[in-house]
């Protein structure tokens, strides 16, 4: 009977066994291998590697590269690190597996599916190409008050924005609430989850004046792309994260988007500063007199009541002179 069970389990995919045991609450040899979300599956054969320290030069030293010949695309590597001591070696193994096209790595009881982020971005790129084809065939229905081209651009921005958010969700599941960067963002000390998404998931679409990047060379943004290419990559979508590193074209698009931010900051500072200066000069000789009227230093009346309701904004309740509901609720609480 035991032999039949082993033969059966050898034909079933690792992820299916893991998910079934997790949902049934059965503890066993796959209890700690959790899929990142309920519908995720780890496909292919699973190779379990144990990391041992080399005791002498005479002993054989099997490395991860010795197993590479047995792997096929879509297989899963399960790393038994024998405790936290081998975590660095496990990380190196995981990175190597990602480069060799494995569909997932199970390291220290957590499934690190490197193919999932790429899958999300790949589906988004295909969706963009599909919408572009519909537009070129003349079948795209324009939104009210928009041309077909403007409608296409808005739809592409939505698709790529959603893809970036999804990659952030995938990366966020790996980080966990105990991660220092997550704690900093959630507590409000500094940064946001968008920053973490760009660091670990995908930087996303670079925009100039709220639109995709279209200016550059004749009929294309850079000479690396075909003319009149409306695809995601050709119009400033950065598929990589800061951790994985940007390629040259992505780096250039990122510099374009970043430049707009710098210019906006500089322009806004000067505009708001000048506006404040003009307001101060216009209001510097006004005062509230003892009869609650607003007058100039020469005694000329500007307002019969300050702000027309004699309400001090610093002491008001969201613009209202008196917070009636707040007072009533406090009194009723005291009576109860």
Image (tube, grey):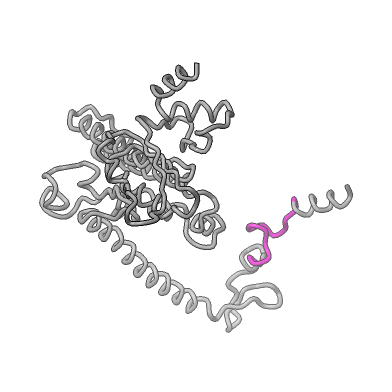
Q: Is residue 336 visible?
A: yes
- The range drawn in magenta is 312-325
Q: Quadrant of residue 67?
A: top left
Q: Is residue 317 magenta?
A: yes
Q: Which residue is at 28% across, 40% downward?
A: 101
Q: Nearer the viewer, residue 130 or 238?
A: 238
Task: Locate residue 268, reporting x and y percent.
Answer: 38, 67
Task: Locate residue 212, reporting x and y percent.
Answer: 27, 49
Task: Locate residue 307, reporting x and y percent.
Answer: 61, 65
- On the rendered structure, is 204 left or right of 315? left
Q: Is residue 302 above or below residue 332?
A: below
Q: Is residue 146 visible?
A: no
Q: Is residue 148 magenta?
A: no
Q: Nearer the viewer, residue 220 or 329?
A: 220
Magenta portion: prevailing SS class: loop
Q: Which residue is at 25% across, 59% downward?
A: 256
Q: Which residue is at 24% across, 31% downward?
A: 130
In the image as oriented, which residue stretches furthest toward the bottom? Answer: 298
């Amino acid at each position: 009977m035991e032999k039949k069970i082993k033969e059966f389990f050898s034909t079933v995919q690792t992820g299916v066994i893991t998910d079934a045991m997790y949902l049934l609450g059965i503890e066993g040899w796959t209890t700690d291998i959790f899929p990142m979300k309920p519908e995720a599956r780890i496909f292919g054969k699973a190779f379990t590697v144990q990391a041992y320290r080399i005791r002498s030069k005479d002993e054989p030293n099997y490395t991860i590269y010795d197993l590479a010949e047995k792997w096929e695309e879509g297989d899963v590597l399960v790393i038994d690190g024998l405790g936290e001591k081998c975590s660095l070696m496990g990380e190196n193994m995981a990175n190597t597996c990602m480069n060799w096209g494995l569909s997932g790595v199970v390291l220290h009881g957590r499934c690190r599916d490197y193919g999932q982020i790429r899958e999300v971005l790949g589906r988004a790129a295909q969706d963009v190409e599909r919408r572009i084809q519909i537009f070129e065939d003349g079948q795209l229905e324009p939104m009210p008050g928009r041309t077909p081209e403007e409608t296409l651009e808005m739809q592409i921005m939505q698709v790529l924005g959603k893809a970036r958010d999804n990659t952030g969700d995938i990366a966020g599941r790996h980080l966990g609430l105990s991660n220092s960067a997550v704690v900093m963002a959630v507590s409000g000390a500094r940064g946001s989850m968008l920053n973490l998404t760009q660091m670990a998931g995908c930087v996303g679409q670079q925009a100039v004046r709220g639109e995709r990047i279209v200016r550059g060379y004749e009929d294309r943004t850079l000479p690396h792309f075909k003319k009149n290419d409306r695809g995601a990559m050709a119009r400033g979508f950065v598929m990589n994260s800061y951790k994985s590193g940007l390629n040259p074209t992505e780096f250039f698009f990122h510099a374009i988007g970043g430049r707009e931010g710098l210019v906006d900051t500089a322009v806004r500072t000067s505009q708001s500063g000048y506006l404040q200066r003009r307001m101060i000069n216009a209001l510097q000789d006004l005062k509230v007199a003892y009869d609650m009227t607003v007058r100039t230093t020469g005694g000329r009346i500007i307002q019969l009541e300050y702000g027309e309701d004699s309400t001090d904004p610093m002491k008001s309740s969201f613009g209202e002179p008196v917070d009636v509901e707040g007072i009533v609720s406090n009194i009723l609480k005291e009576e109860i």
